[in-house]
């Protein structure tokens, strides 16, 4: 099994190179012009070095908020050799850059005779994510909610494979967190030890989709140093084969920035209980179906209310039996 870029960079970062030099390690991937290297410079910046032929060298002077790309001749085996140098210039995004590095290496491994094109193609896909404005730091309650959503996603991916990521539609602006053929699922989390009271936002969040059921899947969690963090759950999903960029893009839509992952690793939760509830005719809710006249909801704003799920009968929901339509993806 190929070592991850993250672990290689951690090893290289233990010692600093001399100014103007790189500390390098063979990535285990070769292209037509030689070995591709992981590298860390004297300032600790994570780097990928892709060897090139002289004919491929061109003029590049490109920088974004967190990435630098340039052609440069480096001394290698006592002679100057041309390289494409892709570097992370913001250490807060080191873990994100490590995932980008993995993707670059995978692409070069598939097209070793087209290493430059493969690298630039991957960079073009990832560039927007590195340039996007970073959201603020999420609070404990927000992280608990995100961990709950990722836990449902992990179960779907385990049952249906990596393409189940397409069912996670909350970050895309859908009113429900997960959308499948037979139903939609709204995920809620509470860190209250004493009850399963969850907050509902708006008059449409518990409005069932047309010709499909709606479930609320609620998690009761407690903060615990032995628990699981959001970055760890993300790593679990990546290990299951979920596309790196697609997952990070979804997380960006959920206001999660990898730049804060070092902080988030220390915020952990242990599950106490999780149950699903079908939103049927007896489920307490405020929607156009339960308010008369329904038009009055259009005149209200910032509707928010709490539901005590502990007073309701849960409904078994086997995620392995659900279906969804895969769109795109790899």
Image: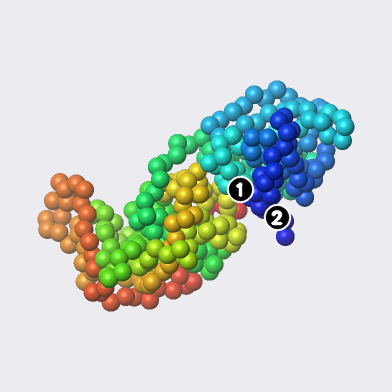
For residue 190, side relative to residue 264 (left or right): left
| Residue at the extreme left | 293
- Compared to residue 164, the image places residue 195 above or below, namely below
Which residue occupies the foreground of this view, 202 or 271?
271
| Residue at the extreme right | 78
For residue 128, side relative to residue 17 (left or right): left
Which residue occupies the foreground of this view, 319 or 29?
29
Q: Residue at x 39, y 59 (%)?
A: 144
The total number of labels drawn is: 2
Q: In the rendered image, is residue 304 in sight?
A: yes
Q: In the rendered image, is residue 48 in sight?
A: no
How packed mark 1 is, by other alpha carbons closer than 10 Å (few <14, some 14-19, many 20 or more), is some
Q: Quadrant of residue 190?
A: bottom left
- The answer to which of marks 1 and 2 sits earlier in the sequence is 2
For residue 142, side relative to residue 33 (left or right): left
Quarter of the image with the N terminus is bottom right
Q: Position of residue 221 (x, y in %)?
A: 37, 66
- Compared to residue 138, the image places residue 131 above or below, namely above
Which residue occupies the foreground of this view, 141 or 277?
141
Which residue occupies the foreground of this view, 324 or 21?
21
SS at mark 1 in the image: helix
Q: Position of residue 316 (x, y in %)?
A: 38, 76
Q: How is the image coloured?
A: rainbow
Residue named by callout 2: 3
Q: Quadrant of residue 89?
A: top right
Q: Quadrant of residue 290?
A: bottom left
Q: Residue at x 67, y 25 (%)?
A: 60
Q: Residue at x 72, y 56 (%)?
A: 2
- Real-space CA distance between mark 1 and mark 2, rounded to the nearest whole angstrom: 12 Å
Q: Position of residue 126 (x, y in %)?
A: 57, 40
Q: Position of residue 127 (x, y in %)?
A: 56, 37
Residue named by callout 1: 99
């Amino acid at each position: 099994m190929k070592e991850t870029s993250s672990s290689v960079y951690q090893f290289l970062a233990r010692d600093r190179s001399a100014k103007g030099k790189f500390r390098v390690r063979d990535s285990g991937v070769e292209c037509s012009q030689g070995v591709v290297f992981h590298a860390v410079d004297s300032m600790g910046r994570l780097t990928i070095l892709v060897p090139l032929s002289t004919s491929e060298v061109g003029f590049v002077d490109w920088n974004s908020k967190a990435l630098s790309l340039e052609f440069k001749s480096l001394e290698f085996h006592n002679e100057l050799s041309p390289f494409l140098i892709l570097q992370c210039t913001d250490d807060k995004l080191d873990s994100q850059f490590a995932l980008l590095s993995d993707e670059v290496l995978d692409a070069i491994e598939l097209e070793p005779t087209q290493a430059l094109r493969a690298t630039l193609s991957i960079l073009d896909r990832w560039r927007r994510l590195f340039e996007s404005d970073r959201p603020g730091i999420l609070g404990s309650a927000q992280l608990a909610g995100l961990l709950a959503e990722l836990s449902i996603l992990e179960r779907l991916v385990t049952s249906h494979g990596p393409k189940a990521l397409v069912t996670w539609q909350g970050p895309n602006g859908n009113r429900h967190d997960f959308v499948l053929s037979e139903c939609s699922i709204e995920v809620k989390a509470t860190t209250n030890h004493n009850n399963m009271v969850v907050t509902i936002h708006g008059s449409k969040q518990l409005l069932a989709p047309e010709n499909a059921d709606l479930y609320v899947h609620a998690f009761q969690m407690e903060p615990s140093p032995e628990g699981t963090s959001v970055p760890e759950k993300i790593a679990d999903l990546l290990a299951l084969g979920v596309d790196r960029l697609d997952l990070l893009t979804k997380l960006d839509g959920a206001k999660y920035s990898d730049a804060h992952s070092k902080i988030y690793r220390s915020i952990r939760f242990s599950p106490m209980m999780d149950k699903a509830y079908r939103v049927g005719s007896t489920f307490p809710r405020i929607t156009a179906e339960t308010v008369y006249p329904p038009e009055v909801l259009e005149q209200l704003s910032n509707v928010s209310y709490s539901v005590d799920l502990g007073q309701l009968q849960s409904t078994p929901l086997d995620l392995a039996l659900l279906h969804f339509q895969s769109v795109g993806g790899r």
